[in-house]
Image: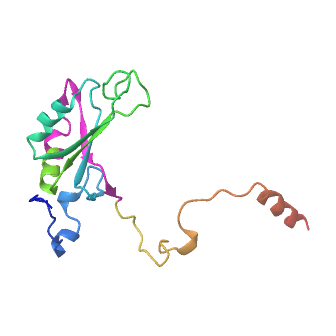
Amino acid sequence: MADVEMDIDTPATADETTPNTQTRTQSAATAVRSIEGWIILVTNVHEEASEEDLQDMFGEYGEVKNVHMNLDRRTGYVKAGPRRPGSSDHLADEYATLDEARAAIDGANGTKLLDQTIAVDFAFVRPPPSGGTKTKGGRGATGSKGGRARSRSPDADERKEKDATE
């Protein structure tokens, strides 16, 4: 194979495997690295934003390895804006290191891109831990009684009434 230099991740140390404040998102979830790198999600992007605009803005925080933009096939613009309710108005930037991704989030979140305020956060997260202690099977300390309420079958009320009358 040709002399190609490849980026290789260093093995994680004990300090890197424990969550720290640098890997926390705006909602206190823990950011998770994807296979390729640290991916950030940029929302509320102006529909006329180009890949060059994004490279210019996010390039100052580190080397952007990849940019993914959802483009409208007909117009070529980013699928965004108030005229298209329910459309995606986001894109993803990929950084090689956590420091670069964190710098981009801290630096660009709440700033304006083409006169529109953008929001920036990690794309992949592990949710914050829930309150109780965990037991085997993924259920909380209350066992099978805890968790979300479940809907009853339609016949449950009829059986209950029938048993009560007998």
In the picture, which quadrant includes the N terminus?
bottom left
Seen at 44% across and 31% down, the residue is 86
Residue placed most toward the observer, 89 or 26: 89
- Residue 105 pos. (x, y %): 18, 45
| 108 displayed left or right of 90 | left
Q: Residue furthest bottom?
A: 136
Position above or below: 55 against 114: below
Quarter of the view holding residue 81: top left
| 114 displayed left or right of 146 | left
Seen at 41% across and 74% down, the residue is 133
Quarter of the view holding residue 13: bottom left
Residue placed most toward the observer, 121 or 94: 94
In the picture, which quadrant includes the C terminus?
bottom right
- Residue 121 pos. (x, y %): 25, 46
Total marks placed: 0
How are the colours assigned in the image? rainbow
Position above or below: 91 against 78: below
Position above or below: 84 against 42: above
Position above or below: 65 against 30: above
- Residue 76 pos. (x, y %): 31, 24
Residue placed most toward the observer, 10 or 123: 10
Seen at 33% across and 34% down, the residue is 70
Quarter of the view holding residue 127: bottom left
Query: Is residue 60 inside the magenta stretch?
Result: no
Residue placed most toward the observer, 145 or 82: 82
| 59 displayed left or right of 48 | left
The residue stretch that appears in magenta: 105-127
- Residue 148 pos. (x, y %): 55, 60
Q: Residue furthest right?
A: 166
Query: Is residue 110 inside the magenta stretch?
Result: yes
